[in-house]
Amino acid sequence: MRIHSRQIKIFCIILLLSLLIACSRGGKKSASQEGTTQYDTKADIFTEEKIKGNQSMEIQSGEPGAGEVGIQKIAMTYNLEMQTKEFEKTQQEIESTVFKHKGFIEYSEIRHNDYYSSGTQYAHWIFKIPKEVSGNALEEFKTFGHLVRMQQQGENLTSAYQDTQSKIELYQMKEERLKALLSKAEKMEDIIKLEESITDTIYQKDNLNKALKGMDKRVDYVTVELSLTEVRDYTEPKTEMISFGQRVLIAFKEMGNNIVYGLQNLILGIIYWLPLLIILIIIVFIVKRFRRGCPLKKKTCFWKKKKETVEEKTVKEEEQNREDE
């Protein structure tokens, strides 16, 4: 009876630990799904007119005291967080829209369901879309699911762009002067030094031209960082203050969801670990059985039998020796 009671206690402890782990998994998953309510749901602020207005920031502006007209170089970045109930369909629609507008995928991360999760597929992309059509692409993205959050950010590269252009012009003038000196040089030492200076000047100028092209690419292509999460219910924006009673109801609802997810994960965990649990129970049973020195049925153990036979032999030998004497 003690053996059975201890085994039952061990099994109950294992089940309790599995339940706690399952509930913690469910709580984390629910928190990740409901956590989107904390974001500022200000997606409606970004209308098509405002998006296009931000793209037309290459306005003409003259420098103080100068008659030349410059162009503002603004690199735009948009961050979108979306929810969907049909993950695969929305994923294909988003990627097709990028390719349709002559854009490309710079980074992609797709996380599908694992063994324990259900309905928590997730995707994260970084797109590069031509500036001229980025407004249309953003409007199409918003129709593919529920837009939770949208953020825009512009980086002004005008100063760095103009500085790079000025340096290129200086290196160009330096290269021309060095070539003029090289044409007049007569000594071999002067010729070698001038050629080395010309080579270094061309190298520096090429690096600056590459940096200039990189800035042009950042301006000509808008960066779109988009996160997509599969959910059961869309997160609605909270426009009013939530009362204490509503918060209590939400807490009970989340608790119920956590219990359901926890029980589901517990069942899956038991099925997953059942073979190992059976093996552990058998090992514990065998160890306890032979530790006590005898099996459940009242029979002597094989090592005790062996020990008794040895003792019987010694007794018989002693008796025989006495008879011989």
Image: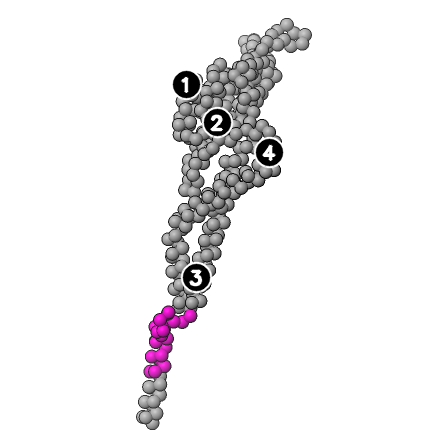
In front: label 4 or label 2? 4
Q: Are marks 4 and 1 in contact (CB under 8 Å)?
A: no
Camera-side mark, 4 or 1: 4
Residue depth check, mark 1 versus mark 3: number of the one nearer the observer: 3
How far apart are the two marked residues, 4 and 2, measured between alpha carbons?
Answer: 22 Å
Alpha-carbon neighbours of circle 1 within 10 Å: few (<14), some, or many (≥20)?
few
What kind of residue is marked 3?
Gln
Disc 1: which residue: 100
Which one is earlier in the sequence, the residue at label 3 or at label 4? 3
Residue at the disc numbered 3: 7
- Name the residue beneath numbered marker 2: 146
Above or below for 208 versus 35: above
Return the residue nearer the eye: 33 or 122.
Answer: 33
CB within 8 Å, label 1 to label 3: no
Quadrant of the image containing the N terminus? bottom left
Tag 2: Cα neighbours inside 10 Å, few (<14), some, or many (≥20)? Answer: some
Residue at numbered disc 4: 242
